[in-house]
Image (cartoon, rainbow, N blue to C red):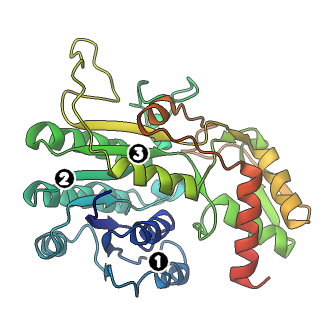
Amino acid sequence: MKIKKILLTGAAGFIGSNLALRLLDVGHIVVGIDNHNNYYDPVIKEARLARHSHHPNYTHLRIDLADRKAIEKCFSEHRPQVVINLAAQAGVRYSIENPIAYIESNILGFAHILEGCRHNSVEHLVYASSSSVYGSNTMQPFSEHHSANHPLSVYAASKKSNELMAHSYSYLYGLPTTGLRFFTVYGPWGRPDMSLFKFTKAILAGETIKVFNHGKHHRDLTYIDEIVEGIIRVLECPAQPNQVWNSAIPDPATSSAPWRIYNIGKNSPVELMDYIRTLEKALCKEAKMEFLPLQPGDAPGTYADITDFVGQFNFVPAITFEQGIVKFVSWYKDYFKC
């Protein structure tokens, strides 16, 4: 493995902070970017960052991807060889309330990253997409070779836009880009706006949890360590053109340009009620539940086809949901001293 200088955006985020630790551990030089916004309590972002901010091979920049001048300066001063873009305005439901925030961060901000890569000879751009791009598609498991053109939220649309923008830069400028469609990432140091965090907090406090779609939907839940391992494997293998790509029957997951899309998921969806029962068992406490309809923008189910990812990178996520929940609950109780 060659040591690289890596620009990592979203470095104080859930996935970004865990990835930063791993990158530094294997010897890479990491320049981290995060705007430390208050979409959720920024205290946990500071706590995540504190785990790696003092590492001698780490530099942290508190800047926003939407700040073009700041991003240009970052690229020109630090000259990264590889870029991993995990920064984004997250949250499907919040995108319905505040869509402009997603345009500014996830589309304009990503354009600034692409321009930085283009003008600074970046070897490989790896970026976070999302399972939400599958939208109203109901053919499961979701495959990268399926259509993903009917997003159900602005968040999903912004992630699909990233994939299309990346393709144009791969085609026009020869920039190798790899998009990773993450499937519901969970685990220690997670996001407080996610259901696992909310459910755990409410159950421990004896409060009622909101169970949407009357508990009938399912998610392909993927443990954080599996996502980190997947990214590590991808960054070492820049996307290559598909030599047999046929423009008459275009494959949505590959291209004649150095551009690829992969799913990263557990390939084992969990029903919501099983999810809650597993959490109750780990907490040794029963949940009080309020059953509600499916929310606007939510998909009733996700299920990742990871055939391409396994075949290309020889990695199969192995941590079960039950194991992951126990790890999360142990971390939660330790972090919050409860």
306 over 26 or under it: above or below: above
Image coordinates of residue 122 in percent, x first then y, are: 16, 56
N-term mark: 2 or 3: 2
Categorize mark 3 by other alpha carbons within 10 Å: few (<14), some (14-19), many (20+): many
117 over 176 or under it: above or below: below
Is 38 in front, or is 308? 308
Quadrant hosting residue 326: bottom right
Image coordinates of residue 221 in percent, x first then y, are: 63, 47
Residue on which disc 3 sits: 180
Single out the residue that lies furthest toward the front: 1
Quarter that holds the N terminus: bottom left
Q: CA distance from mark 3 to mark 1?
A: 25 Å
Is the Cβ of the residue at disc 2 closer than 8 Å to that at disc 3? no
* Left or right: 243 in relation to 314: left
Numbered mark located on residue 76 in the image: none
Quadrant hosting residue 280: bottom right
Residue on which disc 1 sits: 38
Numbered mark located on residue 123 in the image: 2
N-term mark: 2 or 1: 1
* Left or right: 29 in relation to 142: left
Is 87 in front, or is 17? 17
Q: Residue at x 47, y 34 (%)?
A: 134
Q: Nearer the viewer, mark 3 or mark 1?
A: 3
Q: Nearer the viewer, mark 2 or mark 3?
A: 2
Under mark 1, the amino acid is Asn
Dot 3: element: strand
Q: CA distance from mark 2 to mark 1?
A: 33 Å
